[in-house]
Structure formats: structure tokens, C-alpha cells
Image (tube, rainbow, N blue to C red):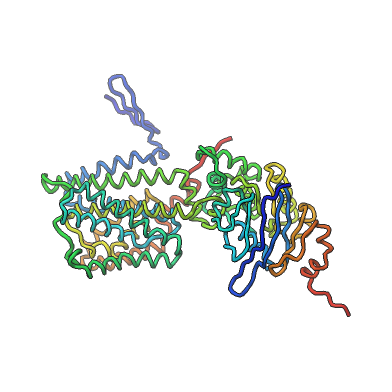
Amino acid sequence: MELEVKRDRLVFRARGNKWEWGIEPRYWRNPAIYVGLLIVAPVVVYFVYPSLLATVIEANLLAAIAIPLALMSVGTGRMNFGPQFYIGIGGYIAALLSIHYGLSPGLTLLAAAVGGLVCGILMSPLSILSGGLYYTLLTLLFPLLFLEITFIYTDIFKGDVGLFGVAPLVTGFAFSVNQLIYAFASLAIMLIYLYIIDKTLRSRYAVEMAAINDDEEVANGIGVNVNKIKMVSFAVASMMIAIIGWFYAHYYGTFAGITFLPLAFMLKILMVIMIGGRIQIYGNVIGGYFIAFLELILILTMGDMSPVLFPVILLVLLLTLREGLFGLYRKRHYREYMPTLHVRR
Amino acid sequence: MTEILKVMNVTKNFGGLTAVDSVSFSINEGETLGLMGPNGAGKTTLVNMICGSYGVDSGKIEFMGKDITNLPPWKRCKLGISRTYQIPRPFPELTTLSSVVVSALCGKDRPNRSFEDAATEATHYLEFAGLFSKRNILARDLTLFEMRGLELARALATGPKLIFIDEVMAGLNPVEAEKAVRLIERAKDQFGVTVLWIEHVMAVLMRAAGRVIVLHYGEKIAEGPPEEIANNPAVIESYLGETKNA
């Protein structure tokens, strides 16, 4: 076996066979490299510092919320400020069905997905009827209303104590092994979302969505069924976010609205989007990891001050990185605006 | 000639203001119909009603014999109605090519159309509008004249039977304006579209239109060949104001 490092490629020879990998910067954008790193990361963390696995899981889940939110944003042409509402829907459906009816996680997943989808369909006319600030305020309001409902109907939702006794997804292993499996499960969900939405954003529907984003009225005038695209993207993204709620319920074994429905949780998602860039799904992965680890560092170093510092950091980001880190990259590569079309004569 | 569009007594009110008051007219297939009138006459409102951007308070609109009064804009587009805008409204964040691809994908129903088919067809319309070399430029970075070309390419890519051209001359210098007029005339010949041309500039309609309708304060005050319209006292009065005899 022989490994040779050349200027632009690595050459690996073994038993008369030869494999080459290009290592020029233009090849670094290959998603397979980053997916590989994400798969290896939990294993490394498991062996080096297993306590960090919880942060890795949180990072994957934050990214998995922000990615469908990007689809919702581009499909409706509006920014939803209450995605945690669907986390609440998915989480409560999973927890209630698991505790009261003893349903397995597989069945609660189905129920949470259907619940999220139905809720999404019912709420999607909002994106048609309202726009701008009104849409933002309405979407911001729903999770808070839901939180109030969980306090009013304490006998069902158990108020701020939350529902506990939800069947775990993984059992029968040591705690750290369980965490490793959860890390891979959360990563799988995030990568599946990334794949589905990446494919969508490279399809014909992406240009239609982009047209809606730019000018709804003109898009409608050139034959784009604006209402249909808005409703579908809203409902599908809601379902995807509800599945994250299902995961939270089975991962923690408990689900309380007070953890996910308040604005503090939305702030984290907003920061993921601010770091990654609005409608930048790959950027959201970076954002998810950045925020999860930033939160950990702030808690370790600042203690009680960390909830105050989070909004301050968000404000600074809003002022300095209006398009997020990926936005800086996109500014230099604007021709790659999704989807990239290359037509040669 | 067959009637392609029939507008019957359409009225549009904005609060207490009647922007279009019981206007009726029709367009024959292959015709170029001019629509003119002073500022605020209701020309664009009328076009917005025909294209579906505004609802109709009363009256009826038929396209190819089908009642389209209550159809949404995207369905009207699929039937073959397309338009350009007085102030260009490109998709600023899309490239020139992508902007036209959306039209080629979503306009007239074309079975088994792939994304690549639409992209190839879009290049055809970009070439027609002289924008092929700008296909990867963001639409917001185009000049006003190029934006007008893009709007025409975008409208043609939907596969229209009837196209509304809304004040194409606005903001263009004489050379660009001449080019724009020739481009529209070429589009009419090459793609066999019927044109309803809204214009302030009388000379353009005199040259291009076979028939002209004049609106004033939302009412139709004249209809006929351009030469007749140019000498119509009501039209002259609407443009120059009331004449007072000593």
C-alpha cells in the first residue's frame, strides 16, 4: 500500500489498484466530505468526551428545525417566527399517545407526523391571507397561545411539570452508548431533511418558490399557482418540524411545553438561521453546531448570565451579518443562487 | 376574424372612486389594439382586471369564448393571457435565465415538460430579446431597456395568445424606444400573438395599432382607427383640456 500526496490530488495504491482523490479547493465543496465529518464526529466525541454527545444531539436537532424552516420561508416568501408551535404539536402527540395508550415510538412518529401535517394544512392559509409584520406577529403568537393552553388544561398537558414517562427510543445499553445512538438518530433525521430539501431546492419547484419570494403578484401572473406552493411548503415543513418534537419527547422521556414553546427557544432557532443565513440549508447545519456549542460555552463560563447574552449576540449578528455567514459566501457566488442553471449553446 | 377577448361592461370602484366605468370592447385574433388615455384614465386598472390582479365589481370578461371573470391570474395565464408591467417588475434575486424559466415551466400547459426543456426554451426567448449574453446576470443588475426586454421574454415564454404591453416607452431614450417597438412588432409576427398595447405616446400607436380605444376618467370615450382617433375632438380635449371659445 502506498499513499502519495501530489499538488492537486492524493494517490492511493494497493495491490495493483490505484485510487485518486482531487484535493483542489474546488473539490472541498463536495457534500460527501462534510457528511463524512458529521458521521465521524459523534464517534470521536464518544471516545474523547462522551458528555458532549448531548450537545451534538442538540446541534443536529436545531439544524433539523432550521432546515425545514428554510423550506417554509422560501415557499411562502415569509419568515415564520413560531416553528416551535409544531415542535409542541409533535411532542405532545407523541408523549400523550405513548403515556396513555402505550403506543410504540414508531406509531407515535406516524401520529406526530400526521398531526404536524394536519396542523400545517389548517394554518397554511395564514401565509396567503397575511403578510409582512402581521404574519410574523401571528406566527409568533401561536406557540405562546399553545403554552397558555397547556397551563389551562393542566390535567391533560401537566402544565410546567410536563408529561413524563414517554417510552425511550433506545433501551438496553449503557447511557453513553444510548447517547451515541441518539446522536446518530438525530444526525440521520437532519441529513434526511437536508437531502430532501436540497433536492427540492434544485428542482423546478425551487424557481417557482424563488419567484414567489421575489414578487408574488408577478409569479401568479406568469402561471405559478402561488397558493398551492405556499400551502404545500408550509404543511410539509410543519410536519418535518413536528417530527423533531416527537424526537425530543422520546429522547428526554418527558415533554413540557415550557421548555420548547417560549420565545427563548425560538431565539435559538433564529440565531441558527442568522449564523447560517436565511434559506441556506447547509449554512443551517453550521449554525446548529455553532449555537449548540456556544450555548454550552456560555452556560459553563457565564452561568446565569447566559440567557441575557444570547439576545445580545443575536443583536450583534443582526447588525453585522445580515445574510449570515453563508450570505457572505453567496455574495461572492451569486450565480449559484438556487437552482443553478447551466445552458450552453 | 375571431374574437379572442370580449370585455363587457366591466366596472371597478376603489372606495368612492370609479376607476373603470362600464367599459366594453373586444379584440380580434392577430390584431394590435391600442389603449390610450391621460394619466389616471384607468388603463392599467382595466388590464389588471383582465389579467386577474384585480377583481371585477360588475361586468363580464370572456377569453376565447370562456368566461374568465372570476378565474385567478395563474389560470388566465395558462389559458394564454400574459402581460408586461409599466414599471418593470423583474425577479431581482433570480438570474435572467431563471426568470424566463419560471414562465416556460408554469405558463401554458405543456405535457412532459422537464426543467431542462424549459431552460432550453427560455434561452430561445432570451436570444429573441437580445439577452442571451446576460443569462447569468441577476435581473436586478439589468438596465431599464434590458429589463423591458426581459419582461417581454418572460411574457412570451408563457406561450400567450394575447399579450398586454403596458407603456413600454416610459423611461427609454428615443433609440431604445425604437428598438423596443421593433421588438414588439417582431414578437407579434414571429409568435403570432395578439397585442393590446397601452401607450401614452400617440405616434407609436399610430404606427403599430390597427384600432385604438381611448379611456378618460374610467370611461371609454372613443374607439376606431388611429387616424380617426387623432382627430377626435373628445380625445383632443381629454389630452389638452377643455377648449374655451371667446
Residue occupying image coordinates x 21% and y 68%: A153
Q: Nearer the viewer, residue A287 or B148?
A: B148
Would you place residue A24 above or below residue A87 in this image?
above
User: Toward which corner of the image does residue A319 lie, by quadrant?
Assistant: bottom left
Q: Position of residue B13 (x, y in %)?
A: 61, 70
User: Would residue A32 appear left or right of A209 to someone viewing this image?
Assistant: left
Residue occupying image coordinates x 64% and y 66%: B11
Residue that sits furthest to the bottom in the current view = B246
Q: Position of residue A46 (x, y in %)?
A: 18, 45
Q: Position of residue B221 (x, y in %)?
A: 75, 66
Q: Position of residue A25 (x, y in %)?
A: 41, 40
Q: Nearer the viewer, residue A314 or B4?
A: B4
Q: Nearer the viewer, residue A306 or B176?
A: B176
Would you place residue A10 above or below residue A59 in this image?
above
- For the C terminus of chain B, give its image quadrant: bottom right
User: Toward which corner of the image does residue A252 lie, by quadrant?
Assistant: bottom left
Can you see residue A124?
yes
Residue occupying image coordinates x 31% and y 27%: A12
Residue that sits furthest to the top in the current view = A16
Would you place residue A196 above or below residue A74 in this image?
above
Can you see residue A325?
no
- For the image, the number of numbered tags is 0
